[in-house]
Image (cartoon, helix red, strand yellow):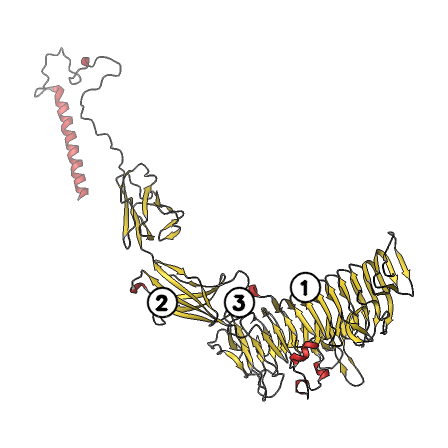
Amino acid sequence: MPAGADITITDDGSAHTVSSAYRLHVEAGGRLTIDGKDLTFNKGLVSCAGEFVLRNGVLDMGGSEFRADYTPHTESGGVVVCGEQARFIMDGGVIRSAKVLASTGGVRVCCNASFVMNGGTITDIHNESQTDAGPVLVYAGNTLLGKGAASFTMNGGVIENNTNYRGGGVHVTGKEYTYRASMEMNGGIIRNNTCNGFQSAKNYASGGGGGIYISGNAQVVMNDGKIVGNTVNGGQGGGVCTIDGYYNTFSGGPNSPGAWPIEQYAQYYPAAFTMNGGEISGNSAIKGDTEADAATGGGVYIASNCVTLRGGCIENNYAEQQGGGVYIGSIPYSMRIYNAVITGNSATLLGGGIWACPTGDTEAFVTNGAAIFDNAAEGAGDDVVSVKTAGQDYVLTLADRMLGGGRADWYADGALADGDDAMGQPAPDAPRYDAASEAEPLAQIQNSTEPYALKAVASEEAKALANACGALFIRGNRSERGGGIGSNGGVVMGESDKAYSLTVTKAWADAEEALQTSVTVYLKVGDSVLDAVVLNAENGWTASFTGLPDPSSLADGLAYSVAENPVPAFFEPILSEPSLDEETKTISITLTNRYIPHGDLTVSKIISGSAADAAEAFPFTVVLDDETIEGVYGDMTFAGGVASFTLRGGETVTAVGLPAGVGYTVTETDSGGYEAEARGATGVIADGQTAQAVFSNHKDKPAESEPSDDTSVPEPSDGSDSSSVSSEAPGVSESSDASSTPSTGDARTTGVYTALLLLCGCAAVLTVRRKGRGE
């Protein structure tokens, strides 16, 4: 494809295989696009000095073996991208099946060229023991093998199922200080690739970088994407491996005669790796079939002074020896970590969270630092182990607060056995941390040269806050030592000299001295309630929370505050705006308790009368003239200044602590037919007084009818005139001449009198008997 040409090769909907022993050449200024999903190029080789776009189709290199060639490098890989104008854009398709030797790649980028991968797959590219090779080789140098920088941007696509010596997926190397090789990962997946170390005639050559290998004058920035399921057998860095070459240049390290300071060397050969996001997970560094002492850094291995971890997840990786998640290989290297949560990692021996050998400082600061908690180690030191040996003056510093500002108390958790074992062994008889024990947390661990095996204890609120503030999560990783992080160099977490204090002062407004009692004030970050201080007259109503993160470093939307709990009854807490003194790094807050004048309101119910029902409940409503009053006040609950309730006779309810000056009206909404009387139903609440509203209800039964004194004879029912009814005794007629009074000896009356006497005698007998029973 000559300069000026723009050629697209596509298919016609049918499968086609193109076989050729020759390469497709794209000259500078030319453009070639392959866009045919049914196209397969056997021996599909492309050399590009212009622009090559692969959208669809298969470049099957048929197992071709590539060897390095000198200028113009057209034979140094399956797809060779070389030259100032050279650019390869892979939107889709497949590149597969080749064997790459030294300085070659399935895709080789060099001489100021660039490769952008948006999609597609690169797979089945293999190398056994050759250096500077890989499925994707990003090669910068100043030699006959390539002169100029090189760059690779991965936005999508998959690089998988490849094998190599170093760089199972991608090998990024800068051979000379003038030109830099670079990679930016914004997406895509690098997975299931394998690197194998090997035994040479002279020594063991460890493999490295199952996903990505970074060496010399090179840098890789990971913003997103996944590096997952890669493996190194007999080497380091199951996911990512960085090697700057310092020890190759100065064989004795920083103590070599004429050795450059690492800071100076790193300007030219940084082997830099910056992780801002993405996922490095499920990778492994194991011994494999070798007996080499090389199985470290399951997720990331570091032999560089330019590694910074800021965001993303490093999780569920495994190292057979040290550093399940991350391992720092030696001094003079230091790794920098920011806003990290190191949790849920495990070690079969020492340091579930972090294990540090005697060389290199391990420092955890509070601002943009780390939270280390809930890790586990079978031998000692669930969260941190720092091994120290004679003659070493490297230090351990652990902030007393974790990421976000919550307290972390450090407790002894087992111990290290005596001796000069640089790896450290657990002391067999040392007790482990027990939450039920009365052990005290250790004093501040600052610049300490003592050995430690430690457990971090933090509240659930502090842990939740750390997770909310975290950007980098190192979790679920495993190893023998240092499940999360293992270090033979330096680890710096956060920013030093950026610890702040928050001073809180209590003030009382309109309150008698007798009402000014000790109060407990809690530190708050956002809605998270953390540790507490007590303010009282003895400390001048002032105390401080110390060792806090720089307030500007808190996650978006979070700020410092304080909360009083409990608030003294009948006081209103008023917080001042925080003031910040940057010179002293002090935040000041005044908490004023203002006395609230208040009184009570009692409502009572009285019922009386013969018809009063003690079980009957009467409904009441209390209406205040302040609709803002809400909540529970003693026995009454107000909503919008209104409370409703019922009372039975003899019952009383009291609203406690109503604001003085508020007006009230109490209404019995249904008196149930009782005669109702109310006293004190309206009024105003007075400070320190109890208002009384008494409701009295009375109800009697209706009056019953009295017996009649009328002795008149009732009128006959047949309607006849009552005047015709005789008032005489029966059997005596008006025509009789005899007197109406019987005469003595009158035969008619003798029987009557006799009968009356008999009846009177019976009555007397009955009367006597009743009296006797009554006795």
Q: Nearer the viewer, mark 1 or mark 2?
A: 1
* Vertical comparison of 634 with 393: above or below: above
Q: Can residue 402 be seen in this view?
A: yes
Please provide percent x and percent y for residue 462: 51, 67
Q: Nearer the viewer, residue 706 or 45?
A: 45
- Given contact means CB atoms under 8 Å apart, are the residues at marks 1 and 3 in contact? no
Q: In this figure, which residue is indicated by the disc labeled 1?
A: 224
Amino acid type of the residue that numbered disc 1 sits on in the rendered structure: Asp
Work out how far the residue at label 1 is from the one at label 2, CA to CA, in angstroms. Answer: 52 Å
Q: In this figure, which residue is indicated by the disc labeled 2?
A: 518
Which of the two labelled residues, at mark 3 and mark 2, occupies the earlier sequence position? Answer: 3
Please provide percent x and percent y for residue 93: 81, 59
Q: In this figure, which residue is indicated by the disc labeled 3?
A: 404
Work out how far the residue at label 1 is from the one at label 3, CA to CA, in angstroms. Answer: 24 Å
Q: Nearer the viewer, residue 69 or 545?
A: 69
Which of the two labelled residues, at mark 1 and mark 3, occupies the earlier sequence position? Answer: 1
Q: Determine crowd level at label 1: few under 14, some 14-19, many 20+ residues with C-alpha closer than 10 A.
A: many
In the figure, is residue 337 to the left or right of 442?
right
Q: Dot 3: what SS?
A: loop
Residue 491 falls in which quadrant of the image?
bottom right
Q: Dot 1: what SS?
A: loop
